[in-house]
Image (cartoon, rainbow, N blue to C red):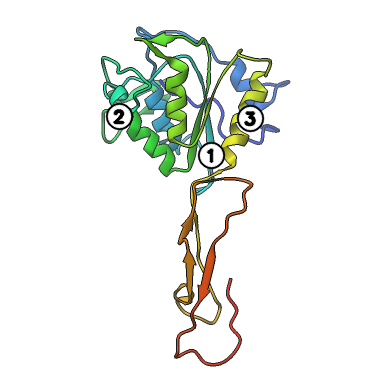
Amino acid sequence: PWRVDQNFTDNTTGSPCETLTPIRCALDSLTAGGGNDEPEAYNRAFFEAYDDSAHLSWDANTPRFMIVLGDSIPHDQNLNADFPSCPATTVTDPGSGFTFGDVTYPGVPTPPLHTIDVLNGLRTNHTNLSFVTYNPHSISGFPVANCHAALAQYTGGSEVVHGSGTDTLESQIVGLINAAAKKVDNVTFNVTSPTVDNANSWFTFTPSQLGPLVAPQDVPYDVTVTAPQSAAVGTYNFT
């Protein structure tokens, strides 16, 4: 249910294909097959997107954007209870171990894989999820596009239907990433000084933090500076 064909890349070098960029080379090698029911292993993909550090490399606090091209829903018996725009499925992804080629993935640490848990994992690991929905249809009376939108919005992402307008897939993906990149979950204030210990104690910010926000945006806040009575007269520098 999961395979990494291309690590994060600037798409300029390292392609095993002589005439193609690394991403195009990876995409051209993909084929679809198998599957015995309509739901798909989305939850395993969401989990591995933040857990598979053996095959995906990124800086610890780097914001990342995950774009799913799909036309189905995750395996999760609790899906409707957690996301009312989605139908529940008859089974939940067990998170079992598997082998693909010469790569073996162990079972997940805390099975089974519920959608809300792995989406929380994406959020914790600074990963924003968006969907490009293909073949828009309904499953058990629930439009798949609406379900995709609900899952994406939970992480701060969004959803578009491919083929609903004149936009190319490329422009839809770029649009989703640009929209997600404008969203700021929260802004916190931290003050440091080369000469003052616990510099934050001199400052009070109102409100104490800002967000969520959509950039660009001017956001007012107040700051009060209170020097302790024990501070010597002089010039202090803060950042």
Residue of label 3: 175
- Quadrant location, the N terminus: top left
Residue at x-position 56% and y-position 92%: 233
Q: Amino acid at mark 1?
A: Arg
Are the two marked residues, 1 and 2, in contact with CB atoms closer than 8 angstroms?
no
Q: CA distance from mark 3 to mark 1?
A: 15 Å
Residue of label 1: 64
Task: Judge the density around disc 2: few (<14), some (14-19), many (≥20) Cα neighbours within 10 Å.
Answer: few
Q: Amino acid at mark 3?
A: Gly
The label shown at residue 107 is: 2
Residue at x-position 60% and y-position 79%: 237
Residue at x-position 26% and y-position 21%: 77
The label shown at residue 88 is: none
Task: Judge the density around disc 3: few (<14), some (14-19), many (≥20) Cα neighbours within 10 Å.
Answer: some
Q: CA distance from mark 2 to mark 3?
A: 35 Å
- Mark 2 lies on a secondary structure that is loop
Location of residue 61 in the rendering, given as x and y in whole percent from the top left corner: 50, 49
Vertical side of 155 occupied by 37: above or below: above
Considering depth in this image, is 1 or 188 the residue closer to the camera?
A: 188
- Mark 3 lies on a secondary structure that is helix
Vertical side of 31 occupied by 79: above or below: below
Label 1 or label 2, whichever comes before in sequence order: 1
Q: CA distance from mark 1 to mark 2?
A: 24 Å
Label 3 or label 1, whichever comes before in sequence order: 1
Location of residue 70 in the rendering, given as x and y in whole percent from the top left corner: 49, 17
Camera-side mark, 3 or 1? 3
Q: Amino acid at mark 2?
A: Gly
Q: Is residue 175 left or right of residue 1?
A: right
Label 2 or label 3, whichever comes before in sequence order: 2
